[in-house]
Image: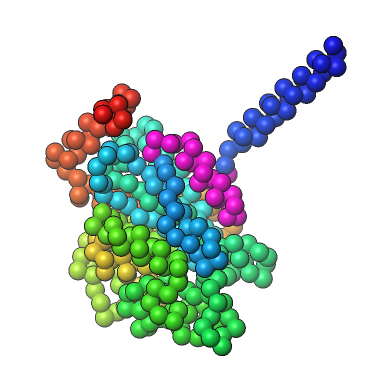
Amino acid sequence: MLFSVGLSLVVLLSVVGAATVERVEYDYYKYHPMPEITDWMVQAAKNYPEIVTIMEYGQTYEKRTISLLKIGVNTGEKKKAIWMDCGIHAREWIAPAFCQYFVREILQAYKTDPKMQVMMTNMDFFVTPVLNIDGYIHSWKDNTTRLWRKNRSPGPLNCTCYGTDLNRNFNANWGTLGVSFDCCDNTFCGIKPVSEPEAQAVTYFVGNRREDFLCFLTIHSYGQLLLVPFGHPNFIASNYDELMKVGRGAADAIRSVHGKHYTVGTSPDVLYANSGSSRDWARMQGIPLTYTFELRDNGTFGFELPQDQIQPTCEEAYSGALHIITYAHDKTFSGATATAATLWSMLLALGVTGTTLM
């Protein structure tokens, strides 16, 4: 009898212990290796099944699945959209950390913030936490690979080096300037436009929905910059003034959080000229608001930003991103459309869904 009670107690303690482990909160203020990020994506979809789904939209060179989180209310109608990708450059670890933080913040805001509820009713958020998965995993291998930038595809014939700079591989003035054709260089642009499977995945997914996207945000580090199209100095975006105005508003929002200054401008004006970037490609597709975020810092730590700066970096960048996203939403939705979205949000609050309406 005592043995039976003792055994039951052991089983009970084991169950309690397992439940305690399951309740351990995800740490958004540390860098996570790829398997942990993948598990986090799965958990986000489980925790918010009514608004979060995982979509697979490509494979890396090493045959890993490229996935994103689609976040938004299923209204049964075609919706406008926001794009965000992080980790196109492997060594920029703060970028995937921000994408995870961004997702957490909008999901929490959805619970209580009527504005976020309206935005998620009108728009879907497509967030890729790590685009360059092969490169990101390689950067975690050891200290010798920590600063790896490119993907992991082999170089062209007779080249012993690996990797293409994915942010020089898009079909946007490809190969014209700010790139290298030496396959061993960090800015090697590939053998042709969109030669890399990761660039192909974004090109196909976004390109097929180009009319839906209001905003394209690609997150990088470092430099504390908000870059607008185009990377080539001979090209100017047709809505350059709008891009600069909204970008300056985002920089003001960033500065209001922790006092950090972000410079706004085209890459040739504030950084260096380049070609083949995803931001420029997205603008050429007709997506009106396309920005590159270069997060902290200004070079003190560079790509190896200490973990104690993750929280303030994410807090300020979230404020900047939200400014751009809110502008995109409010410019598009007004009057009857906004009223309809507000009504839908009220129905959601009452527990009415597309399923119950049918």
The picture quadrant where one finds residue 172 is bottom left
Residue 146 in the image, given as x and y percentages of width and height: 62, 67
Question: Which residue occupies 59% across, 62% down?
Answer: 137
Q: Which quadrant, please, contains the C terminus?
A: top left
Left or right relative to 257: residue 333: left
Q: Which residues are magenta?
A: 27-51
Question: Which residue occupies 14% across, 38% down?
Answer: 336
Q: Which quadrant, please, contains the N terminus?
A: top right
Residue 174 in the image, given as x and y percentages of width and height: 35, 79
Is 293 situated above or below 308? Answer: below
Question: Which residue occupies 44% across, 81% down?
Answer: 191
Most foreground residue, 355 or 132: 355
Q: Is residue 121 visible?
A: yes
Query: Does the segment drawn in magenta span residue 57?
Result: no
User: Which residue is farthest left?
Assistant: 336
Residue 294 in the image, given as x and y percentages of width and height: 43, 63
Q: Is residue 268 visible?
A: no
Is 48 situated above or below 297? Answer: above
Left or right relative to 244: residue 190: right
Left or right relative to 133: residue 18: right
User: Which residue is farthest right?
Assistant: 2
Most foreground residue, 72 or 59: 59
How many marks can you see?
0
User: Which residue is farthest top?
Assistant: 1
Instruction: Indicate the colouring scheme.
Output: rainbow
The picture quadrant where one finds residue 72 is top left
Query: Does the segment drawn in magenta span residue 35?
Result: yes
Question: Which residue occupies 50% across, 86% down?
Answer: 182
Most foreground residue, 288 or 348: 348
Residue 251 in the image, given as x and y percentages of width and height: 35, 57
